[in-house]
Amino acid sequence: MAPEVASQAVALCDTAAAAERQLGRWLDELGARRVFLVSGGDSFRRCGAEALVAAALGTRALCRFPCAGSDPAASVLAEGVGRFKAIGPDCVLAVGGGSVMDLAKLIALFASADIDPLRWAGEPLDGIEAGLPPGIMIPTTAGSGSEATSFAVLYRAKRKYSVEHPALRPGRVLLYPGLTASLSGYQRACSGFDALAQAIESATARGATADSRAFSRQALALCRAHLERMVADPEWRDREAMLRAAYHAGQAINQTRTTAAHALSYPLTAHYGVPHGHAVALFLPAVVRFNAMHGVRAAEGFDAASVRRLADRIGLTRAWLAEGGHDRRAVAERVVAGVNAERLRNNPCPLAPDDLMDVALRALIDEETGAGKC
Ligand SMILES: [Fe+2]
């Protein structure tokens, strides 16, 4: 895969040895001596990244900051900022899923800009001068696209913030399909659907451009051919294709941001712990349907019904609603109350409060089984 722009180098490696050599080369190029590594918890070892990174690092000093679980709290970020400042690294390496990569970006930014994350209340940071150490990102899931973007998600007090800064876009991205081998089918479904949703939303976002649409098209073609296989019984080419799909979807939303489906998903994740990709899958069909009713063409033929069927086929159903004994109207009201206004404004057609409630209710009801009905 050729570098997208001069400021970001991307390497797609087909063996662990090639990935190890590429990482070592980049560390040499950067003259890295003290590396700050943000990684997953036990998954870092299970996916094979621990051995790969250790071999590439050689004798360089390493500070590892593990991040277990998804969507780390501001207190974890604050702890990371403290560790980062104490060490003064000359390179930031993130190896993990979207939460890990976002955390690495946020630690570097808050530490470099000398901002206490526990006091930060959502003020824009894009005007702040922050010289971050060079960053290398190695995704171990195929979904978030964080490796391609200049923003990161932070949940604080059940609220989602998107932290944006030009310096958050990592300079180097290493894609190695072998690292996705230890993911469960459900994790592959959640991450893969996130990439699909990001590409669909970007294609119809208010700020879409010819370039962003081209990235979306690339991502959607790969998702169409490989997402279901990636979930069911992935071969190497499916893992590679979905890593590329996630990267391209990341390139697309880096220009456009996401829209209403993501806007509605965040409160469901914050309040009910529904994984991000699953939460997006619940809302996307209803949002695509609403947009179509207002004249917005489906992105590359992904209309509401086909998106819904695809989500169901890969197991991202609304069963959690019935299993958890949730009342769908109460859930919808909570979602609407906590909707992310910024992403909502990016939807191609505006949603009035009644529209939003209608979309949320429709998203949470299973027309075929009636699950979730009042
Ligand atoms: Fe997403």
Image (tube, helix red, strand yellow):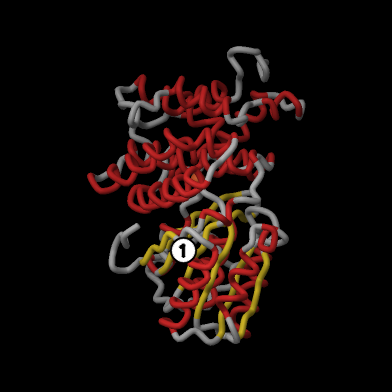
Where is residue 169 shown, x and y percent of the image?
41, 64
Residue drawn at the location 47% of the way across and 49% of the way down: 240
**Res 202 → quadrant:** top left
In depth, the one of 5 and 177 nearer the eye is 177
Camera-side residue of 148 and 80: 148
Q: Is residue 99 visible?
A: yes
**Residue at x-position 43% and y-position 42%:** 198
Q: Tell me residue 208's x, y (percent).
A: 29, 43
| Residue shown at 48% from the left, 56% from the top | 146
Amino acid carrying label 1: it is Leu
Q: Nearer the viewer, residue 362 or 358?
A: 362
| Position of the C terminus by quadrant | top right
Q: Is residue 134 above or below residue 368?
A: below
Q: Which residue is mark 1?
A: 174
Above/below status of 209 relative to 309: below
- Badge 1 element: strand
Q: Is residue 16 above or below residue 235?
A: below
Q: Is residue 48 left or right of residue 235?
A: right
Q: Quadrant of the N terminus?
A: bottom left
Rendered view: 97 above or below 355:
below
